Amino acid sequence: MSLAGFALVFMAGLGFLVLAIGKGKIHPFLALLALSLCLALLAGLPLLDTATGSGPLPGVLSVIREGFAGTLRDIGLVIIFGTLIGAILELSGAALRIAEVVLKLVGPAHPELAALLTGWIVSLAVFCDSAFVLLNPVRKAMVRRSGHSSVALTTCLSSGLFTSHNLIPPAAGPIAAAAALGVSGQLPLIFLLGVLVSIPALSTVYFFSLHQGKKMNVAEDEPQHHSRDNPEMAADGVAERGHEEASEAPSALLSFIPLFLPLLLMSLGAFVRLAEAPDAIDKHPLILEFLSFLSQPELALALGLIAAFVLALSCGRRRELGELTEKGLRTAGPILCITAAGGALGHVIVASGVAERLAQSAQTFSGLGLCFPFLLAALLKTAQGSSTVALVTTAGMVQAILPTLGLDSPILRCLTVLAIGAGAMTVTHANDSYFWVIARLGGLSTEQAARTVTLASLLEGLAALAAVLLLSLALA
């Protein structure tokens, strides 16, 4: 098939994906597998494994199996461990403790900033939908105690959650995209770059939220028994006695350990790479080997999970751990399926030989650079609603054409992960369950949610892209 023919089939496949998930309500896992099979057949891959003079040529199902199994092999345990850590943070009340700490650090006079940063931290491990439900009582308490706009606090909390959900490991989407692009060993670097990219995104949405909060009101903004003259009250018992988990929450130190221990251990990998000069290896082979072992994402997150279990036990939650693990595995299951199906699609694209044909048209694509994965992710996000699907699918689609786009160095592959994450934020609207969670719990009408949540996701996505492009100029 010619490049133009494959491009037409590919665009038709994207249309099928959007309609199947959005209108047909077909699960993304099935839609991605169906698209993988159709593309493999239309690209002319052999139906069965074939022996050729240059070696074996895998058939359609072998290619799909390879992509599916390879993705699970690379990130399956990472996603499972990360999901379980998030579930324990939710059960133990540690997420609420983190919120209290952030509010006290930021200051009671700035609850919007506290909500923004709390969401950004908590969504490193807890999916933004459930994290918003978890932290909504904290947000409402901030509104009542500070007298600040409920709309502004809702927008800040939801945007903070959304930013780290799409940009920063150990959130599942960025991890999956990193694996698809062959940089799963660079997670500490992606984390640091993601933090940098988050700064303009969070700053943009913070000022936007303050502006929108002055223009609209919801029922929560009706006068309550609070006073703007006593903002100190915002820091006192922010989760309230009415929320049982707040009273039973662990200490701040224990609450943060399950999040930051894995990141610290994974960062050891960067230290080992810096120390890999021949003389260092000769002098300290066992130490460097052990540090490298600890820095592997699976082991780092497993140790973080052990810290989370200790956290749960310290809160008297031993009896719920079995049920909690079951719940966490049920949450991780769909993510694993979607991620693996996206990996299968990416492998089909590679096996089809489209990368070689695209290389012949490199001049056309090279000018787009990091904007191409951003636009593709934004198209998928806007059309079908799921940021995770947009992240995984886009990463699988572009992995074969990174050299064509001029993005084949390790640092540019890491920045591509972030460009895709920025696109996967752009935009959330009525076809996204997160949109309705925010609108319902934040007391926003559909129109108000569109003017706040949707516009905020557009602004933070564009700000994140601008930061990625600036970083590419400085680092590439």
Image (cartoon, rainbow, N blue to C red):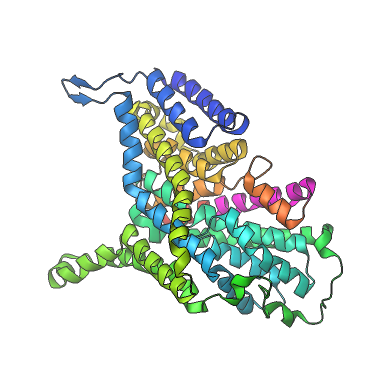
Decide if residue 73 is in sight here: yes
Image quarter for residue 36?
Answer: top left
Residue beneath the point at 36% across and 56% down: 186
Image position of 343 with respect to 475: above or below? above
Q: Count the marks.
A: 0
- Residue 405 to residue 419: above or below: above
Q: Nearer the viewer, residue 326 or 467?
A: 326
Identify the residue shown where x is 18% and y is 20%. Answer: 52
Left or right of 430? Residue 75 is left
Residue nearest the observer in this picture, 114 or 183: 114
Residue 471 is situated, as x and y percent measured from the top left of the image, at: 48, 56
Query: What span is colored magenta in the figure?
Result: 445-467
Q: Is residue 430 rendered to the left or right of residue 389?
A: right
Q: Majority secondary structure of the magenta segment?
A: helix
Residue most extreme to the right: 223
Q: Can residue 455 be found in the magenta stretch?
A: yes
Q: Give coordinates of residue 22: x percent, y percent.
A: 61, 33
Residue drawn at 63 percent across, 49 percent down: 434
Looking at this rendering, what residue extends furthest in the front direction? 319
Point out the residue furthest to the left here: 282
User: If the image is split into quadrants, where does the N terminus sit?
Assistant: top left
Frontmost residue, 277 versus 306: 306
Return the x and y of residue 422 as percentages of the image width and height: 55, 49
- Does the magenta segment cover residue 176? no
Residue at the image point whose x is 44% and y is 46% from the top: 333
Residue 377 at x, y percent in the picture: 53, 40
Residue 173 seen in the figure? no
